[in-house]
Image: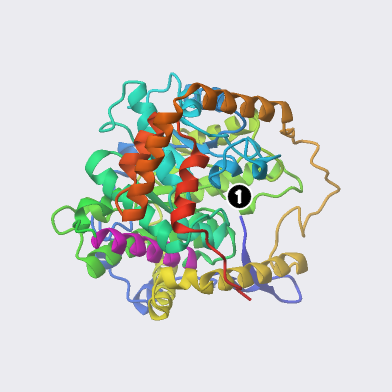
Amino acid sequence: MGVAKYSKDEKGRVTEVEYLSGIKVKSVYTPEDLDRCGFSYDQDLNDPGEYPFTRGIHPQGYRSRPWTMRQYSGFGTPEQSNERFKLLIANGQNGLNVAFDLPSQMGLDSDDPQAEGEVGRVGMAVDSLRDFELAFKDIALDRIGTGLTINAVASIMLAMYQAVAEKYGFSKKVISATPQNDILKEIIGRGAWIYPPAAGVKLIGDTIEYSVKEMPKCNPVSICGYHIRESGATPAQEIAYAIQIANTYIDEVLQRGLHIDDFVGRFSFNINIYGNMWETIAKLRAAKKMWAKNLSERYGAGKKDKKVLFFRGLFGGGGSGLTKQQPLNNIARGAYYGLAAALGGAQTTALCSYDEAYTIPTPQSAMISLRTLQMLMDEVGLRDTVDPLAGSYFIETITKEMEELIEKEMAEIDAYGGMLKAVEDGYVQGKVARQEYEFQKGLESGEFVKVGVNKHVMDEDGDDVELHEYDEETAVAKIAGLQELKRERSSRVVAQSLKSLEQATRTGGNVMPPLVECCRNYVTVGEMAAIFKEVYGEFKEPNIF
């Protein structure tokens, strides 16, 4: 599955193993290792469904409920995305995870000159409520939860999701949406930011506060360690940074007068399953415990209801593990990633499809990923017993060691002055980028083994992959539709809606109510985002080297 440092002797025998987080792996583990690390069943493990939830949040695990399968999907036009959504739902998927194109992520309309060549390329192009009307047509939004993989303009897309649900007859009280909505990881790990970090955190606070009061089944933020891991963080750093990012959002909401138990139970996480399988499992198990400890010890949460301490979210993806070389090998990789997610206790999971190193998944490759998850759930035996690795000398020892590494990384961020300052200064970005550079050098030198890339290499040109060609005509049609919308809508109503949004933004009010009204009146994403740009300005990344 990858990746660790393996030292060998002259006969090729493994002499040392070290995981990326720094855990050095012994050849044999015994009860003495549990004694050495201070393992306690009650404090470190406990029964499933009981604090600190290392064994999972449900007492009967997958016996009581299968994990939610939420494959990442969406491309081109809303009509094309709607067709893919329905295909996946018809074949057993029980949640949606929507991809947006780059212009939408950056708050640009399809007719913006900066959007040229990118409209619908890497996700669904969304300009207004009309696009959501097409994308979610004939989908039971009271039964199908939807992840919205969007960050800088997450507040806009959450408002739009409420507006489209209500247009189709679903109350905002019953719909479940999970916008990614994690701007700090976006600055660390991807680059699709718009506004300064403090302004981005304020907008996230608005969505959390609004959801608590108006959309009780929504998860207003999904803290995304996934992309931080993809960008070069170790597994321990992925969890440490994710928790510290969550703490930043918690602090933002607490200063508004809300009690932590009123909102933190709706936080969710998106965690990566790429890497060495055992290190990944230890990371996932440690994450559940560390999040519960963080909430209870730092914030006093969970005294009335233990459920607010649950580490909830999607463990999936594994995109960094996929290779262009010998792409069919990625089918096997995906299966092992799914296995790691299940053994780590995922409530929701998704797999990158085998062709994603090249292109947007075809219907066939998307179905293979979905069927892989279904086989793990229904054929392989992962529903037989809860947390089958519990009590393993090896797993429990490295889980404890992972916890110590996570605590160390969290303490470093606290000492720096918190995650917001560390991101504003570029401290975390620089650290992660340097690590990714060193890791890439390790791949090129063969220090880290990657089958088909630097070992067992073959002449391979990706003939097994069907490329998703970019359709310029689709983009032209999308732009024409947007311009038609602008002609048809009421200019007066649009201007009034934007004025209300600007007033709320300038006075520090919660922007969600005026955003919902803007969406209902077919104000575009670009027009709403422009108000925020005017008031907040745009983030200028510091020099990280």
Q: Is residue 72 above or below residue 17?
A: above
Q: Position of residue 286 (x, y in %)?
A: 39, 63
Residue type indicated by callout 1: Gly
Q: Position of residue 327 (x, y in %)?
A: 72, 43
Q: Quadrant of residue 303?
A: bottom left
Residue at the left extreme, as displayed: 304
Residue at the top extreme, as displayed: 138
Q: Position of residue 135 (x, y in %)?
A: 50, 26
Q: Position of residue 111 (x, y in %)?
A: 62, 35
Q: Which quadrant holds the C terminus? A: bottom right
User: Which residue is disc 1 drawn over?
Assistant: 319
Is 222 part of what is drawn in magenta? no
Q: Quadrant of residue 413?
A: bottom left
Q: Is residue 345 above or below residue 541?
A: above
Is 254 part of what is drawn in magenta? yes
Magenta region's main secondary structure?
helix
Instruction: Pick the residue in front: 482 or 14.
Output: 482
Whether residue 22 appears in this view of the structure is no
Q: Is residue 102 above or below residue 484?
A: below
Residue range highlighted in magenta = 237-255
Residue drawn at 81 percent across, 54 percent down:
457
Instruction: Pick the residue in front: 95 or 418.
Output: 418
Residue at the front extreme, as displayed: 492
